[in-house]
Amino acid sequence: MNNLIKKVEIIDLYDVDVEYLKDLFCDRTYPWEVLPNIGSYISKLIETGIPGFTKLSENVLVGENVKIASTVTIEGKCIIGPNTEIRPGAYIRGNVITGPDCVIGNSSELKNAVLLRHVQVPHYNYVGDSILGNNSHMGAGSICSNLRSDGKNVIIHGDKEYETGLRKIGAFIADKGDVGCGCVLNPGTIIGKSTTIYPLTSVRGVMPEGAIVKSMDNIVLRK
């Protein structure tokens, strides 16, 4: 693991091509810099509107062909991208914005989070204070833990220590990141592009791109 490059900058993690999401990431270097601005950014978009979107309620904006089950709870502010499906029992607690073609699954809970394009959190997932990249996926029961046990500010453990100044940070899953069932992504975890996490793994720190994480002591690059 020590000789693998641990990328932490937005440009190395995400291809932000959803038009109404671009400005949220503009002029920011690290993904955790996005988190404090999600709520105000959503408020601005709700006020100005997005072409093709309609207001579901005062603080909820939805794109075309969005499917929302009758037992879903949505607390604004929230923007749901086109062709996204929100399945029974999902709980969206506010400050959530998604790109198109996402799945928010049964009994999944989201707050202060960004989902880019074609993200799947389909079964019993918790996603708080996190950013999930294009075509990323979280297996059933996997969670983004967003608060240290000691309550102190989260530090990103990469090739160096990054002081974030934030008490709550979940995980940053890059484009095509795939997290297996029952995983715990500890506060400040970064999963590199096209990296797979084996089921039932507790992950912390920065995982390289194009890797398979079988355990924290067994990380290999894809051949």
Image (cartoon, grey):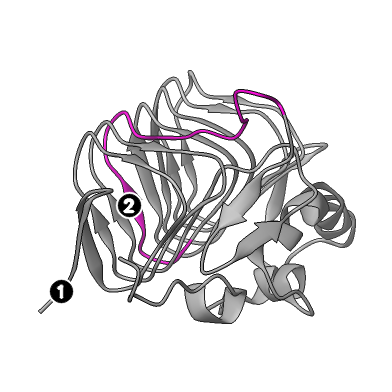
- Reading the chain from its start, which is encountered first: label 2 or label 1? 2
Please state, as top left, top right, bottom left or bottom right, where the N terminus lies in the image: bottom left
Q: Name the residue type under label 2.
A: His
Mark 1 highlights which residue? 222
In the displayed structure, would residue 104 be above or below residue 45? above
In the displayed structure, would residue 31 be above or below residue 17? above
Image coords of residue 108 (percent x, y): 44, 28
From where the camera sits, is residue 23 visible? yes
In depth, the one of 91 and 165 nearer the eye is 165
Q: Is residue 81 left or right of residue 47?
A: left
Instruction: Report the label total.
Output: 2
* Most common secondary structure along the magenta stretch: loop
**Residue 101 falls in which quadrant of the image?**
bottom left
Chain part drawn in magenta: 133-151
Mark 2 highlights which residue? 137
- Number of other residues with Cα within 10 Å of mark 2, as a class: few under 14, some 14 to 19, many 20 or more: many
Of badges 2 and 1, the one in the foreground is: 1
Element assignment for label 2: strand
Distance from label 2 to label 1 (Cα)?
A: 18 Å
Q: Is residue 198 left or right of residue 136?
A: left
In depth, the one of 161 and 56 nearer the eye is 161
- Number of other residues with Cα within 10 Å of mark 1, as a class: few under 14, some 14 to 19, many 20 or more: few
Image coords of residue 200 (percent x, y): 22, 33
Q: Residue at x 77, y 39 (%)?
A: 77
Q: Is residue 103 left or right of residue 97?
A: left
Residue 203 sits inside the magenta stretch: no
In the displayed structure, would residue 50 be above or below residue 27? above
